[in-house]
Structures are given as structure tokens and as C-alpha cells.
């Protein structure tokens, strides 16, 4: 009578266990994206793409950001569009003004908080496009992040800034009318 030796059973047992595993692996916990729900691109594009400025401590700097609508059809039949800027770091005053330049372009007038101490402040503002004032429902591509980089210099140090109110690009066609002029506010503290 032949008796199986345990040396011969061990490889058979391992092969049976590996076959039962089904292969694959990695053990990662990241879920695969749902192929039925495509990612939605941001509803707006911003100019400048990053809000930058230099301001004296104890004062406020006015910043302008142009927002262009990426997909106007998303808003064509909207009864209400409520835009808001969420600043979770307190770098801005809560008095942001949103101005409609055209059906596809808006600009925001932002003011830095005068309470900021000297230093560098970087982060992201969250721009939301909501269907109601409580923001219970947002439009596709909302919210969007708007990066900022602010330099607050000690009081008394001179700063210089130039702030456009609208986009600084224009298109002209041969034989057509000249593009509209663009105003730029230039300021220099102590000058």
C-alpha cells in the first residue's frame, strides 16, 4: 500500500489554494470609476487662473477675476443662477461683487481682508454655481477651485498693482471695427 507523503501534498494544496483565489490582486481599496457617469469639466474658466496680489498689512486690495462660461447651454433654461465664493481661510472680505459682462462672461470684484498679518497666503477659493440661494443643488461642473497667492507686506512698505476690469485680449477682423478699449486701474501706494 502506498501512502502519500506530506512533501507531495504540500504543492498540490498550494496549487488548489491559488486556483481558488481567482488571480488578480493588488488589494487596493480604490473603486473603479463608474463608466456610466462621465466626469464633468468645470463650468467656468478663470482669468487669471490664479489670483495674485501684494498688499500692505492693515489695508485691503481689490482684485478682479474674469469668469467665462464653458457650456452656456447648461444655463440656457435656468430660472436662477446663484454664484457664490466660499473662502474658508478668511483671506477675503465677505463683500464679493459678481458683475455680468455678457451672457458668457462675468467678473468678480474681491477685496482682501485688512486683518491679514504680513506673510504669504496660498490656497483655493471655492466658486459655486447654485440653482437656489441655499445651494441645495448645483449646476454641472460646480464647485470649481480658484487658486490664490497673496503676499502681505509689513505696513509702510511700498506696493504696486495693476488690475484689469475685463479680459486683456481682443479680436480684430480685417476691415472690421476696432476692438473696444480696455481700462486698467493702476495704483501705487505712497507715490
Image: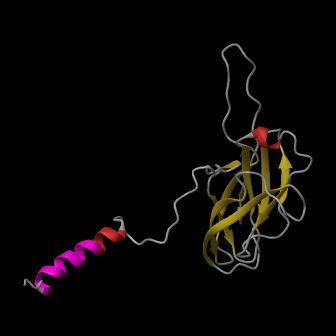
Closer-to-camera residue (156/94): 94
Q: From the image, give the main secondary structure of the stretch colored magenta.
A: helix
* The quarter of the displayed image where residue 190 is located: bottom right
Residue that sits furthest to the front in the current view: 1
In the rendered image, the vertical position of residue 56 relative to residue 75, given as above or below:
below
In the rendered image, the vertical position of residue 106 relative to residue 153, given as above or below:
above
Specify the segment rendered in magenta. 6-16
Residue located at (72% from left, 74% from top) = 88
Closer-to-camera residue (60/49): 49
Color encoding of the figure: secondary structure
| Residue 126 percent coordinates (x, y) | 71, 64
For residue 167, side relative to residue 28 (left or right): right
Residue located at (44% from left, 71% from top) = 28
- Of the 4 image quadrants, the one containing the N terminus is bottom left
Residue that sits furthest to the left in the current view: 1
Residue located at (73% from left, 16% from top) = 176
Amino acid at each position: 500500500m502506498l501512502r502519500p507523503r506530506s512533501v507531495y501534498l504540500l504543492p498540490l494544496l498550494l496549487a488548489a489554494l491559488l486556483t481558488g483565489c481567482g488571480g488578480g490582486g493588488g488589494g487596493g481599496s480604490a473603486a473603479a470609476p463608474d463608466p456610466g457617469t462621465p466626469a464633468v469639466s468645470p463650468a467656468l474658466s478663470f482669468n487669471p487662473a490664479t489670483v495674485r496680489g501684494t498688499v500692505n498689512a492693515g489695508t485691503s486690495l481689490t482684485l478682479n477675476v474674469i469668469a467665462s462660461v464653458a457650456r452656456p447651454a447648461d444655463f440656457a433654461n435656468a430660472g436662477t443662477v446663484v454664484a457664490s465664493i466660499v473662502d474658508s481661510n478668511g483671506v477675503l472680505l465677505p463683500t464679493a461683487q459678481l458683475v455680468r459682462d455678457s451672457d458668457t462672461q462675468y467678473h468678480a470684484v474681491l477685496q482682501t481682508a485688512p486683518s491679514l498679518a504680513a506673510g504669504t497666503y496660498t490656497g483655493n477659493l471655492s466658486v459655486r454655481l447654485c440653482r437656489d440661494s441655499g445651494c441645495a443643488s448645483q449646476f454641472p461642473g460646480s464647485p470649481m477651485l480658484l487658486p490664490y497667492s497673496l503676499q502681505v507686506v509689513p505696513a509702510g512698505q511700498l506696493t504696486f498693482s495693476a488690475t484689469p476690469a475685463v479680459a486683456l485680449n481682443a479680436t480684430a477682423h480685417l476691415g472690421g471695427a476696432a476692438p473696444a478699449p480696455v481700462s486698467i486701474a493702476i495704483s501705487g501706494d505712497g507715490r
